[in-house]
Image: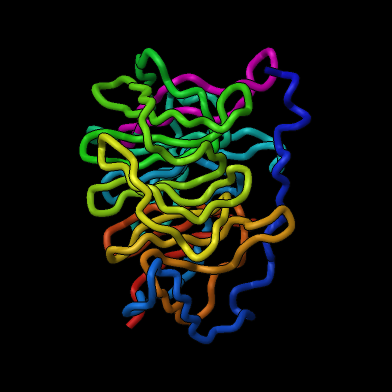
Amino acid sequence: MRSWVAGLFVFVVACGDNEPASVRDAGPSVRNVRDGGPGAPLRVAWRRLEIAGPPPRGQPAIAVLGDRVVLFGGGGFRRGTFMRDTWIFEDDAWREVTTATTPPARTGGMMAANGGRLILWGGLGEDTSGLTVHTDTWAFDGASWSRVAATSAPQIRRGGAAIVGDTIVSYSGLDDDLARSTTTFVFEDDDWDARDVSPRPPGLRNSAMTTLDGFAYLHGGSSPAAIAAVWRWDGTQWDEAGAFATGRAYNALGALDGHLVTFGGVRSSTSTIAETDAWPGPIEVVGAEPPGDDDYAMVNRGDHVLMWGGNAGETWLLERAP
């Protein structure tokens, strides 16, 4: 496995646009990204929270536990380290949590809620022999981490995960051989079930997933080109539900008012995206948008979406605009 280190980041991306949002065009922007024609636009606005938070990093694991957002790890080659710190966002503030036991450091890990706790798995890290793709599963109850005795954790990183009912579904990412995984993994009863289902999305890396109306949705990623398709998992099977106007990889994905919303990522190896899109659209963005970057992550929080990341490690809220 160590022989592929030099080629690990073939899909190279440029750093994000560091121009402050305050100097960007603050006028409204309407984009029609509906498959099949325009409709009433989803009218939204971004709001940056001027707060301190986790140090900037690439591809942390992030998920919602109750009314709190939990972030773990991240880092990677571009950041010069693999991280293993735990942060909680609540009451419009971030705080670092010190725990007696901590999962090994990793970037590109995945995390989702299950049974009143968060489940963490996958990701790339290091051990005594060098780089390793983690095969462990951990649970976080809001105060402490514990190892889950799962028999077959997915050995992947940089994939997506979402919640369907009482289960977690995970798809995409690179496996231990640097191949794009096409296995659907379902976590329930404290163990993983690998399902080879058809039809299914193509093998992807750097995609994102979220939950909307009881379904899991997947969008983005490269196969090897950035894809625009939207795939839906109903707990048993996949179906292709539609498509955004354009594809992107390394994007953040969330859900707001019956729509999927996405921001950031890349369409090529030379530029990051500073656009908010929705499916089904169209979407009207009022005011300034965050700087473009490929290290954002979104979580759904009722009437808004929280997004964290970017080159400066910023916290943004996406809300319905009046």
Residue 117 seen in this snapshot: no
- Name the residue rendered at 26%, 42% in the picture: 234
Residue 71 seen in this snapshot: yes
Quadrant into which the N terminus falls: top right
Q: Is residue 12 above or below residue 287?
A: above
Q: Is residue 80 left or right of residue 31?
A: right
User: Where's residue 196, x and y in %?
Assistant: 38, 26
Q: Is residue 35 above or below residue 84?
A: below
Residue at the bottom extreme of this rendering:
27
Q: In this view of the protein, which residue sits in the foreground, 277 or 116?
A: 277
- Quarter of the rendering containing residue 254: bottom left
Label total for image: 0
Q: In this view of the protein, which residue sits in the foreground, 45 or 199?
A: 199
The span shown in magenta is 119-144
- Name the residue rendered at 43%, 36% in the picture: 171
User: Where's residue 59, x and y in %?
Assistant: 56, 43
Quadrant into which the C terminus falls: bottom left
Q: In this view of the protein, which residue sits in the foreground, 16 or 187?
A: 187
